Amino acid sequence: MSESALATTHRSHLCGALRAEHAGTHVRLGGWVHRARDLGGLVFVDLRDRAGLVQVSFDPSSAGAMLAAQAASLGAETVILVEGVVAERPAAMRNADMATGSVEVRATALRIVGPAETPAIPVARGKSEQLAAEELRLRHRHLDLRRDELQHNLVLRHRLMQRTRRYLSDAGFLEIETPILTKPTPEGARDYLVPSRVHPGEFYALPQSPQIYKQLLMVSGFDRYFQIARCFRDEDLRADRQPEFTQIDIEASFGAQDDITRLAEGLVRALWAEGNSTVSATIPRMTYADAMERYGIDRPDLRYGMELEDVSEAFRGVEFPFTSAALDADGRVRGIRVAGGATLSRKQLDEIDAIVKSAGARGLLRVKRVNGVLQGAAAKVLDDARASLLRLADGDLGLYLAGADRVTGPALDRVRQDVAQRMGLVPEHVNAFAWITDFPMFERDPQSGALGAVHHPFTAPHPDDVELLDTAPWMARAQAYDLVLNGTELGGGSIRISDPAVQARIFGLLGVDAETARARFGFLLEGLRAGAPPHGGIAFGFDRITMLLAGATSLRDVIAFPKTTTARALFEGAPSPVPAADLKDLHITVEHA
RNA sequence: GGGGCCGUAGCUCAGUUUGGUUAGAGCACUCGACUGUCACUCGAGAGGUCGCGGGUUCGAGCCCCGUCGGCCCCGCCA
């Protein structure tokens, strides 16, 4: 953006954009008083706008005593208009910590246009001062957003959004909006519901994703679609989960998995370039089965090794309470080998144990080799031959869990991540991307045994596994894929079912009878029957990508007006009760607990 | 639905272990001094429903019960 394009009636330049080259220029600035320093004659004001800070000096001998006195009385966060001349500072008075530190503006005029109360939370913060409590930052969001960090995050968000549009548009994708008022789908997450005034007792739902709409756009021949789509899920929140969030939603026709992943990779490269970060030349692929076996989870952190090892054979046939029951029940004993881990203290191991228990597994079996001698509860029951199966070198620590993979895998993933942190194995500035492919079609409910869709019910089965749908559907793989970075899922997608007969069969396996399928997804089925091209797509979590590239630790820091962990908006005060008359119009009565 | 941490001045915190005089500090704020600061400096002042309610006690910021709010995690998030 050119300098002059930002010039307006009230200003000629941006504060934070002034440099030595502007010396001698007469400027008019508008901004917020960041800090003022009154030296008892000479007054300095750090003036802030979107571009940053610049020092404005008020010298009574040149600007007049009145003007200096007025400047001295300015409160923080007051909005002022300043006229003056940019002057290069003498060498001794430069401030290397400021982008504008080689110049200052010598004021000739000052107008207070936006008087401000003393801010409820500080915007200008001392170098060692803590941030205000997050509750207050959310309540006074307009002030918090003035801070440099959040300004940068939202600027980055904007750039990533525009880069997404440019990349996809250049690749022939059409940006098409889909409805916000949609049909409730009792599948998956809880919907946010919106009552209909004109249809008593009926409700819209806010979309959890534009999934069905984008498939219908393929049916309609739009070929390549994208949308930076707002999605809504009424589930409990986390630091990386908000009730309304934004995803980059993509769908394309006449392509296979490789076409989608190639396009998605291109987008990711563009976004990471925009965020001044890097993507390796190729993104490795790993099957779901491989990921689960080697890392216990479908989003492995590949920045370091320490893969899971199956040591069941060391314990098979040994009477040992920790492992016997699990092995008898067709479970396994798996764990990680921590090179040099024998130095971890009892306290540290107890902390790791607490992580394991919070992940739903029983405690860890700890074995270490010190001076050639195996130590730990298992040492007594393992002879040399068995002990050698653990492959522990001197100074190594083995951490093991016994039980069903479903439980031990995710727990060992947590252990692996925690230990990697403790042992300093996580390299900085490394982006370990990976595609995880060949997800299973279904997962079985551990209690009822009923099948549920792993991705969603429109996901196409792997061509090699279609037969399995009749014989052992829980073994069937899907044409589904996730993109993972450093243990975080960035996005996922699939090739969709384009044959209505296959779709009907999948609904059958999921226990959705024909009538229910028609009631819930009739408009999709009707679309498929009208002639659907082979199609598939992917969706990326845009907030999460922005968070990662911004180096933020919470989604709240890359969203202008986020919700709290109880889905409240503290700034505007939503949700809130509504007048009885409004409820009556909506045919709603509220039960009070 | 469950677990953990937190709540004291406008903001950040100390004080809670072991209940006891008038609850402190830094920043911000108000007033005063200061002409090259840039987290300006110096002096003075004002500022408190110790989240809220109840209980125990001669006495509660501190102990007990409940409740509200925020954060983190499990469940949940096709």
Image (cartoon, rainbow, N blue to C red):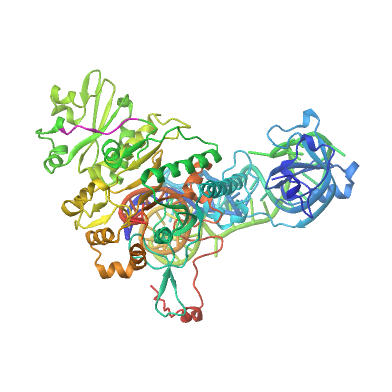
Describe residue A238's horizontal placement relative to residue A480 as left or right: right
User: Residue shown at 74%/54% (left/top)?
Assistant: A79
Pinpoint residue A425: horizontal percent, then vertical percent.
39, 29
Q: Is residue A481 above or below residue A318?
A: below
Pinpoint residue B63: horizontal percent, then vertical percent.
39, 53
Q: Which segment did they paint magenta?
A: A305-312
Q: Is residue A551 visible?
A: no
User: Residue shown at 45%/58% (left/top)?
Assistant: A231
User: Residue shown at 47%/47% (left/top)?
Assistant: A544
Describe residue B43's horizontal placement relative to residue A317 as left or right: right
Pinpoint residue A269: horizontal percent, then vertical percent.
49, 39
Determine the main secondary structure of the stretch shown in magenta. loop
Q: A269 or B46: which is nearer to us?
A: A269
In this view, the residue farthest toward the front is: A531
Pinpoint residue A239: horizontal percent, then vertical percent.
44, 49
Q: A468 or A254: which is nearer to us?
A: A254
User: Residue shown at 41%/31% (left/top)?
Assistant: A426
- Image quarter for residue A498? bottom left
Q: Residue A51 colored magenta?
A: no
Quadrant of the image containing the C terminus of chain A: bottom left
Q: Is residue A185 above or below residue A329?
A: below
Quadrant of the image containing the N terminus of chain A: top right
Q: A183 or A259: which is nearer to us?
A: A259
